[in-house]
Image: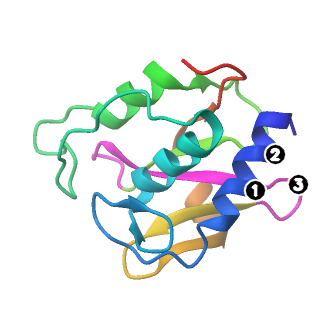
Amino acid sequence: MTGRGCDAVAIARKWLGTPYRHQASTLGAGSDCLGLIRGIWRGLYGREPEAVPAYSMDWSEPQGEERLWQAARRHLIECAPGPVAPGEVLLFRMRGTSVAKHLGIVSEAGACPRFIHAYSGHGVVESPLSAPWLRRVVSRFEFSQEVS
């Protein structure tokens, strides 16, 4: 795990137990999956890379636009194919025909991988990166060593 990945996981672990709140990004008070990644970004770099416009829970699904994926590509480094590594940001497509609209961060790799994410009805939790989750991953990203 790179130094940046180790730092990202340590920051994410501080968010565990934060309640789920759509469009929120406040440690301990409320967060959604994007809010968690925004909070990790602030912990790493001190400020967010861009203002986040309001978004619905379905993201841009009715329009079929991959807005979350496009934003990830603007600010994170896309990973080459291979096994997951701690500190990587995972982008999920929850249904085969929908847009990618869920994010998490790998907290452990190896035989029993895990990830941290903000999940509706559960808050920020650490979950096994099981086969049902793995098959929904459409892209993996890492944080840059330098702020963008």
Find residue 48 and report its horizontal and vertical position in percent.
Answer: 44, 34
Q: In the rendered structure, which amino acid carries the disc numbered 1?
A: Ala
Q: Tell me the SS state at disc 2.
A: helix
* Number of other residues with Cα within 10 Å of mark 2, as a class: few under 14, some 14 to 19, many 20 or more: some
- Are dots 3 and 1 in contact, CB under 8 Å? no
Q: In the rendered structure, which amino acid carries the disc numbered 2?
A: Cys
Residue 143 is left or right of residue 30, and the answer is: right
Mark 3 vs mark 1: which is more N-terminal?
Answer: 1
Q: In the rendered structure, which amino acid carries the disc numbered 3?
A: Gly
Please determine whether, in this image, residue 83 is positioned above or below residue 31.
above
Q: Please tell me which residue is depicted at 70% across the width and 46% down the height of the picture.
A: 8
Q: Which residue is mark 2?
A: 6
Q: Which region shows up in magenta?
A: 95-113
* 109 in magenta: yes
Q: CA distance from mark 3 to mark 1?
A: 18 Å
Find residue 113 and report its horizontal and vertical position in percent.
Answer: 78, 60
Residue 30 is left or right of residue 58, and the answer is: right
Q: CA distance from mark 1 to mark 2?
A: 6 Å
Residue 24 is left or right of residue 107, and the answer is: left
- Are dots 1 and 2 in contact, CB under 8 Å? yes
* Number of other residues with Cα within 10 Å of mark 1, as a class: few under 14, some 14 to 19, many 20 or more: some
Q: How many marks?
A: 3
Find residue 102 and report its horizontal and vertical position in percent.
Answer: 42, 53
Find residue 106 and report its horizontal and vertical position in percent.
Answer: 70, 52
Q: Which residue is mark 3?
A: 110
Q: Which residue is mark 1?
A: 10
Q: Please tell me which residue is depicted at 43% across the width and 78% down the height of the picture.
A: 19
Residue 88 is left or right of residue 72, and the answer is: right
Outermost residue to the left = 62
